[in-house]
Image (tube, grey):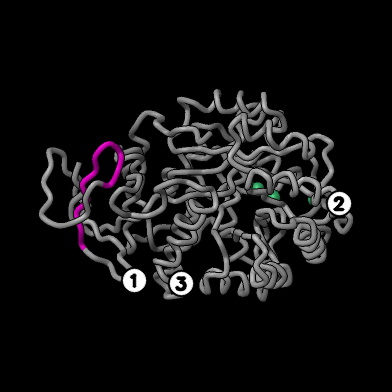
Amino acid sequence: MIVKNAKVLLGSELVELEARIEDGVFKELGRGLRGDVEYDAKGLILIPGLVDLHAHLRDWGLSYKETFESGTSSAVAGGFTTVFDMPNTSPPLTSPSRVRERIESARGRIYCDVGFYATPKGPRDVKGLLDAGCSAFKVFMHKPLEGEDYGDVERIRELMAEAERYEALVAFHAEDPKLISGSEDTVESHAKAHKVEAEVSGVLKVLEGMGGARAHICHLSTARALSLVEEAKGRGKRVSFEITPHHALLDDSTEARVEPPLRSRMDRERLFSALVSGSADAIATDHAPHSLEEYLGGKASGFPSLEIALSLFLNEVNRGRIGLGTLIELMSRRPARLMNLKKVGEVREGFVASFSLIDLKREFRIDPSSFFSKAKYSPFEGRLVRGKVMATFIRGELVYEDGEVVSKPIGRVIG
Ligand code: NCD
Ligand code: ZN
Ligand code: ZN
Ligand code: ZN
């Protein structure tokens, strides 16, 4: 297949190029290419498929919140061609047999590629979980999934020593349980309970316990914790971090229940500048769908983001606040590297032809009622944004076009 008339970002310049795709791979990028099947991408920009390090696809006992089908439809509609699924499922992904089961149950039901995080109950489980096919590990410091306890530096140290032997990435929800206190009934009290100090202390514990292993900080939300991580990176620590659309674009003047909570305007601005400066490793969605009743009733935190994350940031590109190249780095190339995905995250000869076509000028209003996600609510509801995904391809096959998922679930499990 040939994609014609698309613009591709080469260095910092948009260049009109044709792409010849064979066997799911970019075979040739150039001009005057010919082929039997042609896809006209006039006026659109071809970007590498996005990689989300942090999504909750739910399914299983939480299928009423999201399923593999609905979550990955949401992903391809938002330009994501690979997502990594979080292990706080029901039952949770804490054993090799459950990892194998989850891989089996995802097969044939996913529209994009999916990798799985698992949570080790202790260092002893690390090897078995990796052998079963998980891509990385996730530690919820403040909310153990099955009685495991990583609230202390000692426990973190033991886990990280074992993870280091396999070069495994360990992602942390870094909020110190000892510093979360108070009622969480209302959005306001919930935010008060999850104080800045809880994240700062959580991050300090990870930095102290990680040794030479690879640690990743999920949804970093405060300027103070950001400085600590940046400083540790400067010292050569193998720590990476992600920032979510909501923490970079919203602050506590918006009412939304999420963990960690929306912070001050100052925090938001510092986080956004870490994206622009390139100190951040990734933009990750923390796509966290719930039923509206649970969310509004204060029983659950989080909201869906896969479908809108890219548009929210393309809008910032249009406003001149971040470069398109920087954005693609943060949403595709760098997260792909962190997960050791081979030949993914760049539009380049020899690379996997999973990509999207975007219309940078297309304007629309965010309307959660049209989400593929089962969770039809968003703190970004009503926002007018410019920049939209028009089509998404997985290994050269069209999966999403103009508001519709158009293929079978051809995604692969990363395992
Ligand atoms: C996430 C969820 O709903 O699973 N919620 C959230 O507020 N972010 C859990 C998490 O990522 O901590
Ligand atoms: Zn979390
Ligand atoms: Zn809480
Ligand atoms: Zn999450």
Q: Is residue 19 magenta?
A: yes
Q: Which residue is mark 1?
A: 12
In the displayed structure, 233 sits above or below 141; it is: below
Report the mark closest to the observer, 2 or 3: 2
Where residue 344 appears, as percent x and y from the top left, is 41, 48
**Which of marks 1 and 3 precedes in the sequence?**
1
> In the image, which is nearer the foreground, mark 2 or mark 1?
2
Label 1 amino acid?
Ser
Amino acid on which disc 3 is placed:
Ile
Q: Main secondary structure of the magenta part?
A: strand
Query: Left or right of 137: which side holds 112?
Result: left
- Residue 154 numbered tag: 2
- Name the residue rendered at 51%, 48% in the picture: 340
Residue 60, how many percent across, how many down? 63, 27
Q: How many marks?
A: 3
Task: State the CA–CA distance, disc 3 to disc 1.
Answer: 12 Å
Front-most of 99 and 59? 99
Using residue 80 as the reference point, say whether residue 132 is left or right of it: right
Residues in magenta? Answer: 16-26
